[in-house]
Image (cartoon, grey):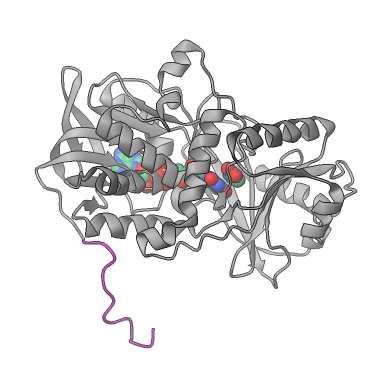
Amino acid sequence: ALTGHRGWERAWRRAQPKARYDVIIVGAGGHGLATAYYLGKRFGITNVAVLEKGWLGGGNTGRNTTIIRSNYLQDPSAAIYEKSRALYETLSQDLNYNVMFSPRGVMMLAQTEHEVRGYRRTAHANALQGVETRFITPAEVKKIVPIIRLEGPRYPVLGALWQARGGTARHDAVAWGYARACSAMGMDIIQQCEVTGIRRDGDRVTGVDTTKGAIACDKLGLVVAGHSGVLAQMAGFRLPIESVALQALVSEPIKPIMDCVVMANTVHGYMSQSDKGEMVIGGGADGYNNYTQRGSFHHVEETVRALIETFPMLSRLKMLRWWGGIVDMTGDRSPILSKTPLQNCFVNCGWGTGGFKAIPGSGWGFAELMAKGHAPLTDSFSLDRFREGRFIDESVAAGVAH
Ligand code: FAD
Ligand code: PYC
């Protein structure tokens, strides 16, 4: 501001589409951009375009509550989420862009005996998977979060699953950092470029139609979260995905009161404090499919009511902003990173309510899948699992009511 906003360097080039690319990625959210970045960094594939219908990071990547953790139950999930969490540890250095990763600790409260058993089980599974979590007592909960009311009018706090190296990061910076690095490798990030059709020759994709004209490609990656069903329909196949609104809100900024993330999944609400002092609060997903990016009012009401039971000191806070994103839900609450019925078309979606934490790991694995045809991190998450009944059930670890 002292320079009158003159002399800023562009973080990424304003690109116009070329006639053809080796790889086109549809969707410049975190997962699309990370995929492009690792295609270049790990496999030397840089003739890549990332096409975005709006502005980059304007989808769920810029709308989420930034929680990063890897305390999942099943082995394939722990592997990809832990890889991702580990990549977050050095992402600022890798991208030379401060993504403000803050491993401040993530706590999932156990407020029923059922949850106690579930989280103890997860802690045991995580120990076998090399993921550092532990089940802590109510006294330890209170020590870490002094503002919590352990008794609760409906559900007392009986303990918690604690991941000390979980935390948060600045969501926009994650998108911007990957975008800048992709652009520096010569890739084209093309905003306001909506894909409106997918061109095929038999069971091969030959290119896409866009609002900026037709573009040819050798390989196509669909990475559009809540719009995955729409893109799959353009390509001529169906996905087991439902799209629903998930919402969040922030309060007016206040002095520091809580220096970790707390999720209360029984009463349903979760909360952290942003660096600006706002309490960042999120609730459950809408109970019906929609594309509204807003969400139903009763969900915020329920969320805030639930949080006030556990944190009574919040009751006088004012809400500052409120928004929603369209999340892509699978039946087993695990993502899809997969080949498709079209030979050279790949899909990365189904991250639902929990894909921000997975951006680096997903990009790492999906780039390998697109480059080599298979990848250890992603093989379990193929579309085949729905036909084979090989579900990766993470409905508890997803942590968000749906
Ligand atoms: P997006 O960021 O949505 O990117 C997809 C992009 O595709 C969009 O920019 C869209 O405009 C573009 N697109 C769509 N159609 C087209 C088209 N036809 N042509 C071109 N471009 C197209 N996850 C966590 O891990 N922790 C959290 O705390 C957390 N909290 C959340 C809170 C809320 C309120 C919401 C909504 C989500 C939350 N999530 C969280 C989930 C997380 O945000 C998502 O899983 C993740 O951001 C998905 O990233 P993405 O890159 O796949 O999708
Ligand atoms: O995946 O941890 C998560 C999460 C919290 C809120 C929304 N998603």
Secondary structure mostly seen in the magenta stretch: loop
Magenta stretch: includes residue 8 = yes
Q: How far from the left and from the top, in percent, is residue 177?
A: 36, 59
Q: Does residue 105 appear to the left or right of 55 in the view shown?
A: right
Q: How far from the left and from the top, in percent, is residue 342?
A: 25, 21
Query: Residue 325: in sight, yes or no?
Result: no
Q: Nearer the viewer, residue 104 or 286?
A: 104
With respect to residue 317, does 34 lie above or below?
above
Q: Residue at x 77, y 47 (%)?
A: 306
Magenta stretch: includes residue 190 = no
Ligand 2 placement by image quarter: top right
Residue at the left extreme? 19
Q: Does residue 266 appear to the left or right of 233 in the view shown?
A: right
Q: Quadrant of residue 185?
A: bottom left
Q: Nearer the viewer, residue 175 or 154?
A: 175
Q: Residue at x 34, y 55 (%)?
A: 178
Query: Residue 121: in sight, yes or no?
Result: yes
Q: Quadrant of the C terminus?
A: top right
The residues colored magenta run: 1-13
Q: Nearer the viewer, residue 53 or 31?
A: 31
Q: How far from the left and from the top, in percent, is residue 384?
A: 41, 17
With respect to residue 176, does 291 lie above or below?
above
With respect to residue 25, does 164 lie above or below?
below
Q: How far from the left and from the top, in percent, is residue 372?
A: 26, 31
Q: Quadrant of the N terminus?
A: bottom left
Q: Nearer the viewer, residue 58 or 377?
A: 377
Q: Does residue 167 appear to the left or right of 198 in the view shown?
A: right
Residue at the bottom extreme? 2
Q: Residue at x 30, y 29 (%)?
A: 346
